[in-house]
Image (spheres, rainbow, N blue to C red):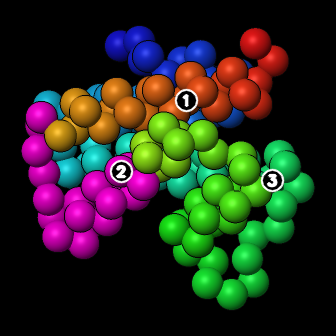
Amino acid sequence: MNSNFEFLEGKWPLLASHGGAAEKYIYNDSNSCLIKSGLFGEAVVHLMLNSDGIPEPKEDNTHANRIKILKNEGLLPKDIDDILYALRIARNKAAHDGYESTEQAMIFVELAYKLGVWFMQTYGDS
C-alpha cells in the first residue's frame, strides 16, 4: 500500500515511517494511529530544533516545552503551532487513557499530513 507520506522518505525516513504507520492504523487500531500521529509531530519538532541549531532544553525537556521554544523563536506559524498542540494532546490521550476513535484518527492523520507538507516546504529542497 502506498502512503501519502512517501514524499518524506528520501529526506526524513522516520517521518515517512510514523506517517505511514498512522495511516495504516486508522481503521483497525485508531489508538495506535493517534500515538503514531503524535510521534510524527514530536519528530518534526526535534528535526526543527536540530535544523535551526537550537539546543534541546537541559531542564523541562518535554515536547510541550520544545514547541514553546520554537514558538518563542518565531519559527511556528499559528496554524502549525495549533496542529502540533492538537497532535500532542491526542497522543497523550491515546497513550495514557487508551483513547481510540476512527473519526479522530482520520482527522489527525490529515493534520500530520498538513504538518509534513509544511515541513517539506519549509525545510526541504522543494
- Element carrying mark 2: helix
The residue closer to the viewer here, 96 or 66, is: 66
In percent of width and height, residue 113 lies at 45, 27
**Residue in the image at 34% along x and 27% along y:** 110
Q: Residue at x 69, y 21 (%)?
A: 121
- Residue 25 to residue 47: above or below: above
Amino acid type indicated by mark 2: Ala
- What is the crowding at mark 3: few (fewer than 14 residues within 10 Å), some, or many (at least 20)? few
Q: Is residue 24 left or right of residue 124?
A: left
Question: For the point 28% across and 48% down, which residue is it?
Answer: 34
Secondary structure type for disc 1: helix
State whether residue 64 is above or below residue 45: below
In which quarter of the view is residue 9 placed? top right
* Disc 3: which residue: 50
Compare residues 81 and 25 and report the one nearer the observer.
Answer: 81
Q: Position of residue 68 (x, y in %)?
A: 60, 65
Q: Main secondary structure of the magenta part?
A: helix
- Which is in the foreground here, disc 2 or disc 3? 2
Circle 1 residue: 116
- The reply to whether the C-beta atoms of the residues labelled 1 and 3 are less than 8 Å apart is no
Q: CA distance from mark 1 to mark 3?
A: 16 Å
Extent of the magenta region: 85-103
Number of the label disc, if any, that sits on residue 40? none
Tell me: 5 left or right of 68: left
From the image, tell me which residue sits under label 2.
86
Does label 1 or label 3 sit earlier along the sequence?
3
Which callout, 2 or 1, points at the residue further toward the start of the chain? 2
